[in-house]
Every structure is written in structure tokens, then in C-alpha cells.
Amino acid sequence: MQLSYSFIVPVFNRPDEIAELLASFNAQEATIPFEIVIIEDGSTITCEHEIAAYPHLNITYLPKPNSGPGSSRNYGMRRARGNYFIILDSDCILPPSYIKVMDEQLQQNYVDCFGGPDAAHPDFSNLQKAISYSMTSFFTTGGIRGGGEDTGKFQPRSFNMGLSRKAYEASGGFGNIHPGEDPDLVLRLWELHFKTALISKAFVYHKRRISWKKFYTQVHKFGLVRPILNTWHPTSSRVTYWFPTLFMIGFIMSVLLFVTGSPIAISLYIIYSAVIFLHASIINKSIAIGSLSVIATWIQFYGYGKGFLSSMVTIRWLRKEPHRRYPYLFFNT
């Protein structure tokens, strides 16, 4: 099958991010034709000026009322001309080899849905690099989400996801939950017997959140949506989703034990934090980033763990309706 690519990028009030993303498109090594579909999702600060700076790029600009990222991606895919969609967040930057690597892998081992990892760009701030570490490290809850290049069971995320038109039309695309719209789509694709894969070399530089408050809000929402997804897709439930909650409960217990004269448990948490500090410092060649990575990891565990436990009690045990209990996790489409 001859592949034609449409890059799908929803944006909300972030023209500066679009400027950086388009600059990275402009620097691509591949000569493969592609289309960029930018969906302006009800922004009051538009990116029209940034788009106008790249008249030689094949850009389709679609302004629309705000309806959330999932609906906006669907809106863009319905209007795109390609038969294979590459979905990116606006806060991503592509390395020069991205399109070439992605196309070569799909030509050799075609799959209807793929995901790629994310990394921290050398120009990112120390805070951004620390948050990136906490979200991707083997020593945290980050890292690659199940499976490898050819397992058929990798879980792509929408900051860097490929989706065939066939898979989009069969699944109906993204739902109206956010965050969580990407794992929901992947789980529905599996139920429809589509395979997914990781293309490890097709990575993006992902800025993520640029403040502790925004980062906490993000991971807290991740924790809230997981029990909802487990309710919708019962076979997706895993004991590993409890780890951040159990980590924080264990920490509280270790503090209580320390107060009563038993320091062993809290020593394990100190050792774990030291491992995070050393590993993050070494790979980033920065003690400052190592220190911030410890903070980011604890925020991640606390935010996700608290959200997960709250949602488990409310949704799974008390049987509350998700749309009514957490209306801010859903967009009306």
C-alpha cells in the first residue's frame, strides 16, 4: 500500500509551540511529501502568523470552536487527505530524522497504529528535563508502555502516534475523555483486532508541563481516569496501576514507624530517592537536574496515586457516574 501522510496537530492558545514545531518540520531530512493539518481548537490567540511564515509547507489550517483535543484530532482526520495520520501534540519538536525513520519502519513492518517515545531536547529547561525524566525513566512509572517493536501490544500516546485511516474509520477515533483519550482508543483498537507497535527511533522532543503546579494537575488527572478506563475496558486492569498509591501509603506508614523508633522502612525511601538523584544526574550530566528529578518523581507518585485512589473509591466502589463526578475530564462534542 502506498502511504500518504497527514500530520494532525490540535492547538489551543499556543502559537509559540506551533512556531517551533513547524521549524522542525522545515528541517526534516526526508523528501517524502506530507501534509500538516493544524486544528485551532477555539483559541483566542491563534497561530495564523506562525503558519504564514512557512508558505512552502503543505499546511491545512482549520479553526473551530473549542471541543477538546480528542474531538479536534477527529475533526482534522476527517478533513485530511492522507491515508495514514501522524498525531502530535503542539508542544513537540521533531528531530530531523523523524519522517525518514517512521516511513522506513512502516514500509518494512506495516502496522495500523504505532507510537514513538519522547525525549528532552538539549535546549529544554532543567525543570522540563526533570519532568521528562520522571515520566520516562525505568526507575519511575514512566518508560515504554508494554511491548516492543513487533509485539502488537504497545500502547501509543497521542503526543506521538500513528494511525491508519482504516483504523480511524473502524474505531471512530478518539473519545471525549481527556486525558485518557489515547489509551481508550488503543484499547478499542485491540478489541477490533488491530495491532499496535513501538517505533523506538521515531521519537519526539516533548516539552510537557513547565511548572510544578501544571505537572501535578496533569498526573493527578492521569490517576483519575485510569479506574474509568478500567471500568470501560475490564481486561485492561493491572495491579501495577496501584503502585503509586501503594508507594505513598507505604511512605506514610514508614514515617509513623520512624516516629516510633523503627527507621528501616523510611531508609528504603531515602535510598530510592538517592538512586533517582544519581541516575538522573548522570544521564543529564547535571546535579541540578538530578535534584529536580527527585521532586518530579515524588510529585508524580503523589498526584497519580491520590487521583487513582480517589477515582477507585468513587467510580469502582461507590459506582458513581464518571461524567457527573468528574465533569472536567469530559468534553461535550
Image: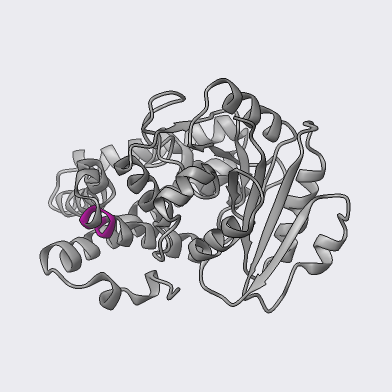
Which of the colour schemes (rainbow, by chain, secondary structure, one colour) is used?
A: one colour
Q: With respect to residue 261, does 66 lie above or below?
A: below
- Magenta part of the chain: 227-231
Nearer-the-camera pick, 277 or 126? 126
Picture residue at 79% right of the left edge, 51% below the top: 58
Left or right of 295 on screen, residue 63: right
Q: Residue 248, position in %: x, y?
A: 26, 52
Is residue 245 within the magenta segment?
no
Q: Residue 297, position in %: x, y?
A: 42, 48
Main SS of residues in magenta: helix
| Quarter of the N terminus within the rendering | top right
Can residue 59 be seen here? Answer: yes
Picture residue at 54% right of the left edge, 29% below the top: 200
Among the 4 quarters of the image, the one containing residue 328 = bottom left
Nearer-the-camera pick, 227 or 85? 85
Nearer-the-camera pick, 227 or 150? 150
Q: Residue 162, position in %: x, y?
A: 54, 41
Left or right of 79 on screen, residue 273: left
Q: Residue furthest top?
A: 108
Picture residue at 72% right of the left edge, 51% below the top: 21
Nearer-the-camera pick, 48 or 263? 48
Left or right of 84 on screen, residue 225: left
Q: With respect to residue 170, does 110 lie above or below?
A: above
